[in-house]
Image (cartoon, rainbow, N blue to C red):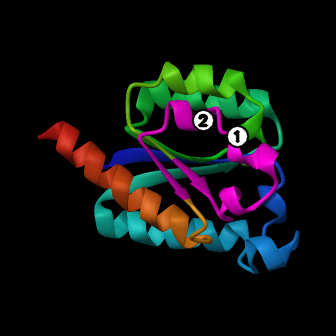
Amino acid sequence: MPTLVYILNGPNLNLLGKRQPHIYGHETLADVERDCVALAAELGVRTRFLQSNTEGQIIDWIHQAREDGAGIVINPAAFTHTSVAILDALNAFDGPVIEVHISNVHKRESFRHHSYVSLRADGVIAGCGTEGYRLALRRIASLVAEAGE
């Protein structure tokens, strides 16, 4: 059975392509999912692509990943800067974690410069647009393969 990688998306990413396209671009979350599924097939992994505006739901998915996931790609969106609870859940996950941000958060408001999730992440990709998801998926697949050797 192929390796399962969770791709978790936080609040307002359901509006991707419609909300502030000058910052986040015109691709939708469905476009991102389609591209990730195609790449995952090339890499020999499976994805579970999920989005929620609710912190508790994201935490529940991280807990589920403890049971059946090999890695997590996470764009926590605004929870990046506020959620110790998501950090705690990620700290309880044994596999690799890659944090993704579509925009370059370091060129934005100062409150966006701090990430709780980065304290756990094995890598952070920011400012690469939605391509960041594919970069993260490639890195997760590489890390999982290295761990399995």
Which quarter of the rendered picture does the C terminus lie within? top left
Kindly check if marks 1 and 2 are in contact, taking CB atoms under 8 A apart as contact: yes
| Residue 1 visible in the picture | no
Instruction: Report the magenta residues as a range.
Output: 99-125
Position of 16 relative to 142 (above/below): below
- Circle 1 sits in a helix, a strand or a loop, which is it? helix
Viewer-nearest residue: 148 or 79: 79
Viewer-nearest residue: 114 or 21: 114
| Residue 66 visible in the picture | yes
Instruction: Give the labeled residue for mark 1.
Output: 80
Write the residue at 55% across / 38% down. 118
Tell me the amino acid under the disc marked 1: Thr
* Relative to 19, 121 lies left or right: left
List x then y, in percent, for residue 80: 70, 40
Examine the image and state in which quarter residue 20 appears: bottom right
In the rendered image, the residue lying farthest to the left is: 149
Instruction: Give the labeled residue for mark 2.
Output: 117
The 10 Å Cα crowd at callout 1, few under 14, some 14 to 19, many 20 or more, is: many
Tell me the amino acid under the disc marked 2: Val
Q: Is residue 109 magenta?
A: yes
* Relative to 71, 87 lies left or right: right
